Amino acid sequence: MIRTGRVARTVERLAQAHASRMAAAVIAVVIAFLWIPIGVLVFMSFADGGVLSFPPDELTLRWYRVFLSNDAAMDAIVTTLTISVPATAISVLLSTMIAYAVNRYVFPGRSWLQLLATLPIIVPLVVTGISMVLFFNGTLGLSGYVSVVIAHVVRTIPFATLVILPTFLTFDRGLEEASKDLGADELRTFRQVTLPNIFPGIVAGGLLAFTLSFNEFVYTYFVKGSGDPTLPVYIWNQIRYNVTPEVNVISVVFLVLAVSMVLVAVSLTRVELLARR
Amino acid sequence: MAEPSGAAGEPGSDEPANRSADGTGDRMAALTSFFRERPRLRTLAVAGPPYGVLILFFAIPLLAMLVVSFQTGEIGGPWTLSNYTNFLSSETYLSVVWKTLVISVQVTAIVVVVGYALAYSIVRFSRRTTLLLLLVILPFWTSYIIRMYAWINILQSDGVLDSTLNMLGLPAVSLLYSEPAVLIGFTYVWLPLAVLPFYASLTNLDGDLIEASKDLGAGPIRTFTSVTLPMTINGVVTGVILVFIPTFGSFITPRLLGGTNNIMIGMVIENQFKSAFNWPFGAAIGMVISVVVVALLILGTRLGGGLFETGGEGA
């Protein structure tokens, strides 16, 4: 099937002799590619000079002070939180219900529920974004804040479900049976046996949902109308119309938030769970 | 459909079965036995609310977009096909679709090759799997716009890349607002996401199969093409879908890194909703994207299974 030419033979010999070294090189290069831009952002947030000149003349904390005294940026953070916190709570509740229903009950439309809970990842954000504007603003007449929260719930459900669902699968159902045999009803069993066991998964799902919601841009951009900008929308406007080094500082805020959230989430579950589809 | 269940389910989940307060306990017992005797209602109480939310706020809006795409000028206008005919008869728009397709294919190819090589290296040759996987996916959880902004810092003229080249005595390239910049930007955002399915399918691959193939005299290339790749093809197809579809619909990356020569279809939609205010036309373009996406999904599921079987026969 495969013509083993001289080139192929050379490649094979190289692969056999240096496989682990090549693998280490691939890992090193790709991880450098992924982290150098982030390192550049952090470094540039301390740059004194004007906008985006590299290398900077001097290092300073000036832009952090500017950021902290910038009311528009602070308002954007508050706006984002007033959206992300309720959206995360609703999303985690609904995702837990999906995971429970899919795992414990057999009902017509079960696979459709799973599909519906996965599709928002696959449909391009811009398509869902405009369809939400058309339906929320055009048909339902929903205003900015409510429609943005709903959009964030739809955006985060797939990821929260992805994290919560496996914790139901790995948890020993014999414990639930035992609880029911001892006379507890389903609700009591859920509260006292199931919930404590799946709780790490729920917290991890919630943290990832919150991170995603805090970063959410496309849905918000289309749905929010004349509402107050969230932090990502604020940055978008900054980058498109007037870049100041302050954006670097905001980037660091985003980074610290994302890294700490994800690390806590991962410590609660296993990193492999994120790789499972 | 979720209303009766929602009303009955909510007080139950909020109030614990309290044994000390007899009244509450009785009511709870009555409620739970009520649900126990009606398994269908119980299922509806749990599955109904999320089902309802996803249908009302995700599925129906997509249908609304389909309806609006056949209306003229504004929502509720008279029915027409003109949004589609205008789009499909315009050479400008068709060339934008072509450009979008070309960029998406290139990005997908780059991400699949690099991501697969990375996942393979991690799974087969590394012991610190968890740490490495974490280093790969962490950037994915930071803001998309921030990640694009990082590349503006690097690629603009006199940016980090040019300054570094300058220090090495090499000529500046000033890549910002070019097609390579768009490709780099997309590769950067999708690589972490694509590595996950590659990693998952490679972990599930039994390492003994590779040893067996080598013992039977196959070289690394033969082993890869007739054992490793066919056995992990589902992961590859998933990766392709996860990269191609969002790239095809993207407007942020081409807007921030591509300049005026790299218009993609997502930007045209954004324009209809943010400055031209022709929502039905924007909805029609949204439908065009959806058709491409659905076609790819169907192709993907077919291809995943098909390739897997051919691989099985060959081995």
Image (cartoon, coloured by chain):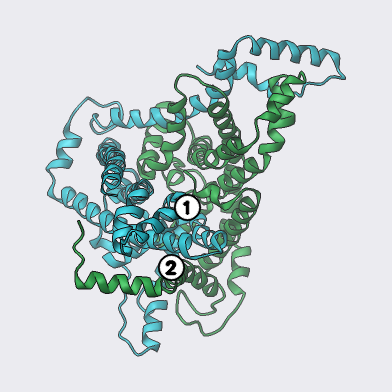
**Residue A15 appears at what percent x and percent y?**
35, 71
Residue most extreme to the right: B20
At 57% from the left edge and 47% from the top edge, which residue is drawn? A208
Q: Camera-side residue: B34 or B310?
A: B310
Q: Is residue A269 above or below residue B261?
A: above
Q: CA distance from mark 2 to mark 1?
A: 20 Å
What amino acid is found at the position of numbered circle 2 in the picture? Val
Q: Is residue B127 above or below residue B294?
A: below
Judge if badges 2 and 1 mark residues of a common chain.
Answer: no
Residue most extreme to the bottom: B169
Q: Camera-side residue: A220 or B51?
A: B51
Write down the colour of chain B: cyan
**Residue B91, which numbered label?**
none
At 33% from the left edge and 70% from the top edge, which residue is drawn? B176
Residue A80 appears in view: yes
Q: Callout 2 environment at 10 Å: few (<14), some (14 to 19), or many (20+)? A: some
Q: Label 1's element?
A: helix
Relative to B211, is B68 on the left or the right?
Answer: left
Q: Camera-side residue: B221 or B87?
A: B221
| Contact (Cβ within 8 Å) of mark 2 with mark 1 | no
Q: Callout 1 environment at 10 Å: few (<14), some (14 to 19), or many (20+)? A: some
Write down the colour of chain A: green
Residue A190 appears in view: no
What amino acid is found at the position of numbered circle 1 in the picture? Thr
Which quadrant would residue B195 be assigned to in this image? bottom left
Q: Is residue A85 above or below residue B111?
A: above
**Residue A67 appears at what percent x and percent y?**
59, 65
Q: Which residue is mark 1?
A: B203
Q: Tell me the subunit letter for badge 1.
A: B
At 29% from the left edge and 67% from the top edge, which residue is drawn? B180
Q: Tell me the subunit letter for badge 2.
A: A
**Residue A30, which numbered label?**
2
